Image (cartoon, rainbow, N blue to C red):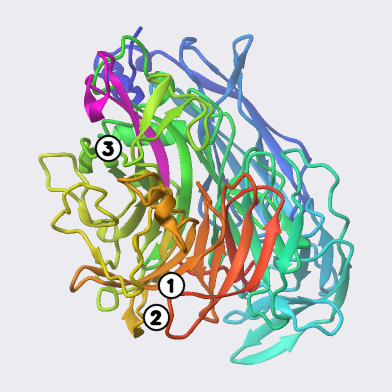
Amino acid sequence: MKRIHVFYAAGLLAVCGMAPLHATVTIQSLTSSLASPQSLGSTVIWSAKATDSSSKDDLTFQFNVTPPNGTPAMVKDFNIGTLSAGTWTSLPFVWTTIAKEGLYTIQVVAKDFITGESATKSATFELNTRVSLGVVNVNKTGNALVALFSAPSCAAGSTMRVAFYTGTATPNYTNWAPCQPPVSMNFYVAGMLPLTTYSMYAQTSTGGKLTNSTTLTFTTEALPTSLPAGFLPSFTVNTPAPEDDPNPMLLWAFTKLIVPVATDLNGHINWYYGNGAGTLLTRPVPGSATMLTIQNGESWDSSNTTQQLLREIDLAGNTIHETNTGVIANQLVAMGAQDATPCGKVTEPLKSGEACLNDFHHDAIRYEIGSQQYTAFMAHIEKLFPAGTQGHAGTALVDVLSEMVIVLNSSWQVVWYYDAFNQLDITRTAPLGETCSAGTSDCPTNLFLSTSANDWTHANTVDYVAASSTQNPDSGDFLVSMRDQDQVIRINYNQGAGSCAPPPAASCIGWYMGPPDGYPVLSNSFTITNPTGDPWPWFSHQHDVTYANSGLPLTIDGPTGPLTGPLLTIFDNGNTRYSAPPLGLGSNCGPSDCNSRGMALIVDEATFTAKPVLLQDLKVKTTALGGAGLLSNNNYFFATGINTAVPTEGIEILPTKGEATGTVIMNVQGSSYSYRGWQMPNLYTPPDL
């Protein structure tokens, strides 16, 4: 058996004058589930069939869409088809858009990456406006709690949004959208309670003047009793929120069999996503009314189907972009990444240095550099090391699990990556010595290189620092939280110009933050102040470590008075802190160190000092998962994770002036664990990272 790097193989065959010169890929058909034309917002399922004369190779399919008078955009990247009787059939391409009416071009590319041969086929499809006689209208969607509002075109240079409300309540608003005459304007309206009648109108801004359309009514449907991909959770209010809370929505990242939902502060569901399988909601995207998710599904060259897909979805649950582990791994290999071979392409005999990309995990974020959008996310990589690595007993090779941080451009193609194995000291073991085996919590379903792996880093957060260099020394870089190392690191991304090349190149890690846990303190490590005399002031096994307000300096009152600087909010799970001595405090953790904590730190890079302004006992021991954030009213929000006795809680903390603690003013408890959570005004204004 052999190990195959598909891009390398294609190049070798071309040089040798072999299969690429003779193999032929032919697309036989590209068909749609509905006949053209249809109305904007209709769901059309596309399928392609093709043949490949190189019968031993996998055939992959990519789908691109060109809008009216626009440029092609990749929507679903290369993924494996299914072979039957010599014909390959693509996975279904489910296409929906409300962008504009007109004639769209759907293109499929079928490609054999071993031979390099490909073929394309296109079809046109017309989408008609939903606006008749210049009158606004509102329609149902496939989601019981989401409406499609359509309005006539508006003048160039103007913007439009939709207001929606019940009774005499203050309206919520969608995002502003630029007018595109002569095409109509279309909005998904989301964040509505079931079986409730809402009033809606379009609001146009022209030169600062607001004009409202006719007001329509829309009644939402009942919550579905069953979903194709899971179940809806239930909620209990433990501490009622203030009636005037400026952040009246909770977004919950339930996963596995419980679907992501949003609720009001009374625990009533007002949004859900039920279209994906095993969906992990990583982040809502500010300003776009979309969300980034990691989902289960078929993937090219994969060894399993768990957490193989990265999808951007809209509020109606439609997929805007999709990629998969197979195509990402192959792009990385083409860029020279040594540890990114798809796990499905690694074959025996295994040897030291063997590595593969297993799945996507934990986080995906959207950010902008200038006018360009980028998406960063993490992927698990396994790598074999010599016997004895990290203190392993025996003569077997040691499987170690870590990750890459991968960056996609606006076309969802890989342009940059960080490989932890190239940058971190492999001899620094995880303080608690966690291991992964197939099917265990937070590990890939199928470890490919061994039956057990050292869960070495377990990174769970990537944060892009958007603040300028005059506002934050970390400007243009990534922060990555490594749970099992009890560390946060800064990666010198430098707006994409930074290099994380393997040794002998210099390390691209700018600094380390976290407890030393018996290891020598690194020269570029932070220390922490301890104004409260806490026996363990540092975080450990932390989650959702991000700068508030995009990393801009903030003035926050703490136990020593007001402090100014960039503010990190952290869910401090505390696993190492309350572990047995001598590493942790053990039974000596009282009175406020025996549980998970909500934490906020002012970061002073002039002195490499982290200064706590919040150390809040959350009264529950959460061994994994969790969310944290600063709210618009300068309160804090924390979402607890896995606890066998107390399911997920969303908690709002009102800080106490002059202290490192605060008062719980809201606590809503879910019926299952949630990976993360967010508190915000509505689905259109999530917190800025």
Q: Quadrant of residue 668?
A: bottom right
Quarter occupied by the C terminus? bottom left
Q: Is residue 241 above or below residue 646?
A: below
Q: Which amino acid, by three-letter code, is at mark 1?
A: Leu
Q: CA distance from mark 1 to mark 2?
A: 7 Å
- Closer to the chain start, of discs 1 and 3, is 3
Q: Please provide percent x and percent y for residue 547.
A: 39, 67
Q: Quadrant of residue 328?
A: top left
Q: Which residue is mark 2?
A: 558
Identify the element where label 2 is drawn.
strand
- Closer to the chain start, of discs 1 and 2, is 2
Q: Which mark is residue 326?
A: none
Q: Please provide percent x and percent y for residue 390.
A: 25, 30
Q: Is residue 261 magenta?
A: no
Q: Which mark is residue 429?
A: 3
Q: Who is closer to the viewer here, 139 or 306?
A: 306
Residue range (magenta) = 374-402
Q: Please provide percent x and percent y for residue 559.
A: 38, 80
Label 3 crowding class (10 Å Cα cut-off): few <14, some 14-19, many 20+? some
Q: Quadrant of residue 422?
A: top left
Q: CA distance from mark 3 to mark 2?
A: 34 Å
Q: Residue at x 34, y 45 (%)?
A: 581
Q: CA distance from mark 1 to mark 3?
A: 29 Å
Answer yes or no: do the residues labelled 1 and 2 have beta carbons within 8 Å?
yes
Identify the element where label 3 is drawn.
loop
Left/right placement of residue 242 relative to residue 410 reads: right
Q: Which mark is residue 614?
A: 1
* Res. 414 in view: no
Q: Residue at x 73, y 40 (%)?
A: 230
Q: Residue at x 33, y 10 (%)?
A: 2
